[in-house]
Image (cartoon, helix red, strand yellow):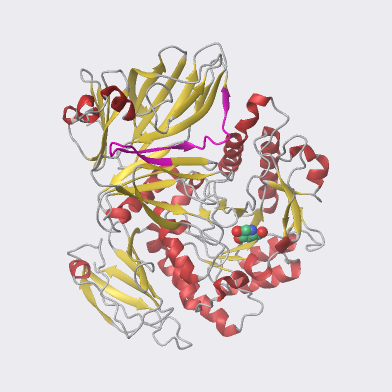
Amino acid sequence: MSQILVDEAGKKFLLRAGNGAYGIGVNAMNKLCSLHWGAFVERVEDLPDCSEVEYYQGRHTRRAAMDFQEYPAWGGEFYNEPALKVNFGRGVRTSILDYKSYSTGACDGGEELVITLGDYAYPLTVNLHYLVYPDSPVMVRWVDVINDGEDLVILESVQSACFHPPRRSNEYRLSHLTGRWAGECMIRRQAVTQGKIVLENRTGLSSSFEHPYFALDEGGACEAEGRVWFGTLLYNGNWKIAVECNAYEQTCVTGGISDFDFSWPLKAGESFTAPKFIFAMSEAGFGGASRMLHDFQRSHIAPEVEVRRVMPVLFNSWSSMEINVNEEKILESAQKAADIGAELFVIDDGWQSALGDWRVDKVKFPNGLKPVVEKLKTLGVDLGLWVEVESFEVKSELYQNHPEWAMNFPGREPYRHYRADVDRTSLLLNFARNDVAQYMLETLRSLVAQTGIKYLKLDMNYYFTDPGWGEVDELEQRTIWVKYARNVYGVFQELKKEFPDLLIENCAAGGGRGDLLMDGVFGRINRSDNQDTLDVLRFHEGFTWLHPSKMAGGACHISDSIRGMNKRVTPLQMQAFAGIMGSLSVGKDLLSCPQETLEEIREYISLYKRLRSVAHEGDLYRLASLSDTPYTAFEFVLKDKSEALLFAFSHGIEFCYKVPNFKVGGLDAGGVYDIECYGDDERKLPGYLKAEKEIKPLSGRALAEIGLSVRLSGDYDCKIVHFKKRS
Ligand code: DGJ
């Protein structure tokens, strides 16, 4: 049975995906109007008529009809956030879009509905694309805008979509994910009262201050229950999501590329495609919403090789050496890293001659990287390197040869970014230029081929300061934001095509580019440079609202907190247990670690290797949060319910408080599970992983209903519980 139903006579369209449905129709004014976004509806005939949706006692119906437009352009009686703003020249700055036609067909393994709108007086076509997959409740929207005329048209805003959750008497609650260095992915909530809340990023990166994500609920949804309407943009540059509640209790979410300093000249016959917006409604709270996104990420965004990848344990040089790497230290550390069980050795910042000159620093590595490559080969450990390809240093040959490649406003000195921690002055490259992007692609291509690296860490440590592009026509200059973002993604997409097994880390001074588009190429994300375990546990909640847990990387889960972040020292075991939920990395100074510490780390690494497939492939349930309770817990259940893991951590438990039983859901109710618990109660050494006591086998039903008592006390306590179904 088709997922897209069309009522030709009533001009209505129904998209059905999983337990969700989305309805649109053409109203009496020939405008495309939103009819339903919510739970499953079987028949297209059951959708309301546009007139019913638009009616409001005493309100001017024509104006109300404009408010429910599925893709409203600015023009006529429309006063809310527009999805499209077009300048046709000759003084015409409005656009009036009418419904023209529709088509359906197969697309990318799913079914697609394309609705064509057109301006009644000017030759402009807008195609609204809707894509539904047979295996997912998540739907996809995007638009193409086409100039069908002879004259140039200037696009001033092209949003990807506009969504209308159901009208309700009480306000919605908006949940979103803010960001900043060392404070990534924080969950924030606020009421949506009459007015407009604008979430956006204008730094040139997608998540330096805010993630391109929204979630609306009726105020009471929690992790496990309640309806949540949510969506996220697949875009790695400047974006905007406006959440607006009008005077008639109608909330509308409009989002896409930021219209700030945006302008796109569309010549005759040209088209502009806006980024994809994926969206769905969960009836199982925020937990349900993130499980939907994780499944969608695995089946429709991430490359297959990344979905299947067993995430290696890596050692990264940054937190112990910073830029002071050299052949001797690296060779010695490589040996130690192999001894503790690391599978990948990443030389972070400092190996290179200069930003821009992506060859080895001959002073630090007088024999090149060859001795390192050879040593790692004998140890059976793969090599990874760090790059920051969007900048070049003033001292680099690249800058000497191509100063014009710096992003700049003519007549102004381009901003010279000085980073004190690495004593480095650099400028941003204008990646919107195809010659710059091509040059970097070739540089990376030969770096990967010549060194045989299996891992590449992309970093980006600056925000745009001079988004100028004096070399192109005045009309083209503001395309820089979008062309830059497209080229960055394009270069790595191409590199991944050429080296499909190369694992690429998405790092931008921590998690500054943490959008889901990037997951289409990058297999690991630097969730944050902040490795204070208590902060990590909070980040992990917001991070997993978007990305699967296995993507949670970074330089050093097990490390001495970089630059004494929060001046907190957390136990090694807690660092390791938190790291095991993601893609585990070690950043400790292995050369100065006592043997006992190295042995302890080795035990955690071997535990990671035993458990990683469950944490990485399992469905995630967030059972408790440090924001609400002095403990937090994450549960992972394999799809076939044969195994599960429960990670529990405490902080600030007082008065000998006993943590309530954890209700371990998602298991096979009729199955009986053997249970093993890791975590040393007394934290005595050695015997780091000593089980606290034997736990009797329990049925999945009992684990969900009665729950499991896990002993946690005081601060920094942690446990991992492993459930294995008896056959
Ligand atoms: C910022 C990153 O987030 C760090 O992990 C590290 O790679 C430094 N840059 C290197 O300069």
Give me the residue at 57% from left, 70% from top: 565
- Residue shown at the point (79%, 49%) measured from the top left: 394
Q: From this viewpoint, is residue 527 visible?
A: yes
- Looking at the image, which is closer to me, 213 or 308? 213
Does residue 633 sit above or below 280 in this rendering?
below
Establish if 480 lies above or below 666. above
In the image: residue 276, left or right of residue 100 = right
On the question of residue 308 being in view, the answer is: no
The answer to which of 429 and 600 lies nearer the viewer is 429
Magenta stretch, residue numbers: 242-265
> Which is nearer the eye, 49 or 459?
49
Residue 109 within the segment the image draws in magenta = no
User: Which residue is at a point 40% across and 34% down the rendered structure image?
Assistant: 161
Count of numbered circles in the view: 0
Q: Residue at x 25, y 47 (%)?
A: 170
Quarter the N terminus occupies: top left
Q: Position of residue 213 (x, y in %)?
A: 42, 47
Q: Residue furthest front?
A: 58
Horizontal and vertical percent for residue 299? Answer: 39, 45
**Magenta includes 255?**
yes
Residue 479 horizontal/vertical position (percent): 60, 31
User: Is the residue 56 above or below the residue 693 in the image?
Assistant: above
Q: Quadrant of ligand 1?
A: bottom right
Question: Residue 8's quadrant in the figure?
Answer: top left
Quadrant in which the C terminus is drawn: bottom left
Q: Where residue 559 appears, x then y in whole percent? A: 57, 72
Quick one: 286 or 209, which is closer to the camera?
Answer: 209
